[in-house]
Image (cartoon, rainbow, N blue to C red):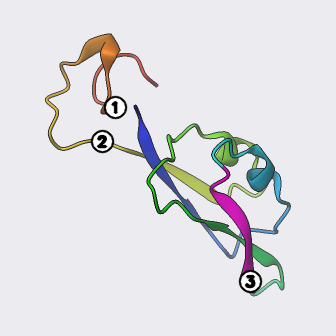
């Protein structure tokens, strides 16, 4: 299973809440802080590491404030083919 994480550029975020609605794992929520523009911030919270880098949050963000990262396991040689669990093998893009 792919694992991922996201980073939100808080100065670009305008709290449109599209990312909150689209995240299938419900890992993004409305935060308490505000950016320099006075907008409340979207916060990413994934303590269990269940983000799978599906990219939906980044696709719907009109400000391109979300960067998505796929986490690749260090203990894989990349030869796992179509049954890839680490992100190095197969055509899992």
Q: How many marks?
A: 3
Residue 34 seen from this side: no
The answer to which quarter of the image holds residue 74 is top left
**Bounds of the magenta segment:** 26-33
**Which residue is drawn at the image coordinates 17% and 33% (left, top)?**
76
Disc 2 to disc 1: CB gap under 8 Å: yes
Whole-percent x, y for residue 40 in the image: 80, 78
Q: Earlier in the sequence, mark 3 or mark 2?
A: 3
Which label's residue is closer to the chain start, 2 or 1?
2
Relative to 75, say whether 39 is above or below.
below
Farthest residue in the front direction?
48
In the displayed structure, does residue 78 sit left or right of residue 83? left
Q: Which residue is mark 1?
A: 87
Mark 3 highlights which residue?
Answer: 32
Marks 3/1: CA–CA distance: 34 Å
Residue 87 pos. (x, y %): 34, 31
Residue 28, x across and y down, in percent: 67, 59
Nearest to viewer (mark 3 / mark 1) = 3
- Near mark 2 (Cα within 10 A), the count class, few <14, some 14-19 or many ≥20, is some
What residue is drawn where x is 60% and y is 40%?
A: 55
Name the mark on residue 72: 2
Element at badge 1?
loop
First of labels 3, 1 by sequence position: 3
**Label 3 – label 2 distance at C-alpha:** 32 Å
């Amino acid at each position: 299973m792919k694992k991922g994480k996201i980073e939100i550029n808080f100065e670009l975020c305008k709290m449109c809440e599209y990312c909150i609605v689209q995240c299938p794992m419900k890992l993004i929520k409305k935060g308490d802080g505000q950016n320099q523009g006075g907008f409340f911030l979207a916060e990413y919270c994934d303590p269990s590491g269940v983000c799978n880098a599906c990219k939906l949050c980044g696709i719907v963000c009109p400000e391109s404030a979300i960067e998505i990262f796929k986490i690749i396991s260090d203990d894989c040689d990349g030869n796992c083919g179509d049954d890839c669990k680490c992100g190095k093998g197969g055509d899992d893009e």
